Amino acid sequence: MTIRRNEIPAGKKELNVDETLILKLKYDDAEAFRKLYEQASPAVFGYAFSILKNYEDARDVMQDAFLKIRSAAHLYEPQGKPMAWIMTITRNLCNMKFRQNTRMAETEDTDLDYLGCPAEVEDIELRLTLETAMKVLSGSEREVIILHTLTGMKHREIAQLLKMPLATVLAKYHRGLKKMRVSLEGIRNE
């Protein structure tokens, strides 16, 4: 993998989740659930991990998110933005997990090693982005970059999801990219 100067590796720019899969869940379609899981699970896991900074908690939230998606599919209103709905569920479950845990430990190096598992993050560029984000970004910068990188959500959608002004989201995104760029250039120069 070659990292050019001023270039941050990113995952898929646009995660295309088929909205009809959620609609089929209303009728308990197991195949639709499997396909939805395949399409969205890396983004759900990455987003949960970026918030919780703990592999096991992120796995639990990912599983809970898909159970919630399946059970709440009848409430989904098609608007052409299924990932925004999925990420809202994920974020709410992460917040619940924070409230359940009396303390949150700092990310250990061993937690980052789990990211190599093919079930979670297969793409090496995406894994490098996640690892760098975990190490150098603040929590809100990490959320904004992970949401944009993993799900392809637009900044305006991220602002709505995180209940932040658009200008704040853009500032956090650009500040975070700059931090990651500096960190990745340091790695490359070693």
Image: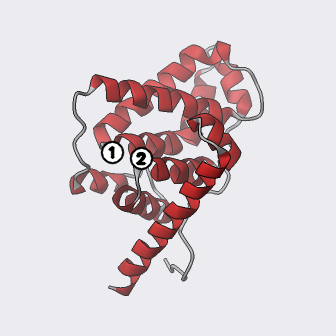
Question: How busy is the neighbourhood of tag 2: few (under 14 within 10 Å), some, or many (20 plus)?
Answer: many
SS of the residue at dot 1? Answer: loop
Relative image position of residue 126 (x, y in whole percent): 49, 60
- Residue hosting label 1: 53
SS of the residue at dot 2? Answer: helix
Which corner quadrant holds the C terminus? bottom left
Q: Quadrant of residue 113?
A: bottom left
- Residue hosting label 2: 50
Q: Quadrant of residue 132?
A: bottom left
x 63%, y 41%: residue:
159
181 is higher (above) or lower (below) than 123: below
x 43%, y 57%: residue:
130
Q: Which mark is residue 153?
A: none
Position of residue 49 in the picture relative to residue 65 (left or right):
left
x 73%, y 20%: residue:
77
Query: Amino acid under label 1?
Result: Lys
